[in-house]
Image: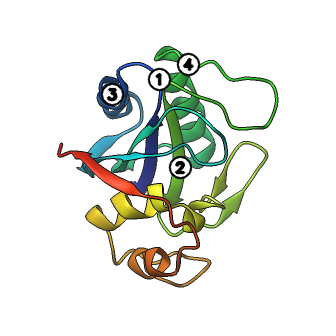
Amino acid sequence: MAEVFLSLGSNIGDRASYLAQAVVEISIHTGLVIKQSALYETAAWGFVSQAFLNQIILIKTTLLPENLIISCLEIERKLGRQRVSDSGYSPRVIDIDVLFYNNLVYSSPSIEVPHPLLHERRFVLVPFCEIAPKFIHPVLNKSVSDLLNECPDLSAVELFSSV
């Protein structure tokens, strides 16, 4: 079984409900949810929009990376995410990103692990530090807490609610 860290985000509608629904769907369709961070509120990153709620979860799964991303995209679709055709950022009811898949370094047209921007995003690193601060990034060879301390992103990440 692979240990996988996922990032969840929502900035449309009942954000906390969408995150909770995503966790349920992930537990049904991808694997066992082992840990969940609290919910954190942050400004949109990379575009102007409503604030996001973000969360990091750790799952155990038998799915290979390609099948895992297919499952995550299907969960997004089921919860109402509508992807726009351009490559820019946009508001969304749910966003599920694969951050790490064990210590695998892997790239394909559909998935890249570790996630290539996670070390630049406080909205990922703050909740990640809550559940696995000592996890070592397999490419950068730094712990998540070290990545947070060195993160160039200075945006506020506020605790919204415990899980």
Q: Earlier in the sequence, mark 1 or mark 3?
A: 1
How far apart marks 3 and 2 lie (CA) works out to: 17 Å
Q: What element carries label 1?
A: loop
Specify the quadrant that holds the C terminus.
Answer: top left
Q: What element carries label 3?
A: helix
The type of residue carrying mark 2 is: Val
- Which residue carries the number 4 mark? 77
The type of residue carrying mark 3 is: Ile
- Which residue carries the number 3 mark? 28
| Disc 2 to disc 1: CB gap under 8 Å | no
- Which residue carries the number 2 mark? 98
- Which residue carries the number 1 mark? 12
How far apart marks 4 and 1 lie (CA) works out to: 14 Å
Going 38% across and 29% down the picture, which residue do you hit?
A: 22
Front disc: 3 or 4: 4
| Crowd class of label 2 (few under 14; some 14 to 19; many from 20; radius 10 Å) | many
Front disc: 3 or 2: 2
Left or right for 40, reference 136: left
The type of residue carrying mark 4 is: Arg
Q: 153 or 27: which is nearer to us?
A: 153
Q: Earlier in the sequence, mark 4 or mark 1?
A: 1
Whether residue 13 is situated above or below residue 86 in the rendered picture: above
Front disc: 1 or 3: 1
| Crowd class of label 1 (few under 14; some 14 to 19; many from 20; radius 10 Å) | some
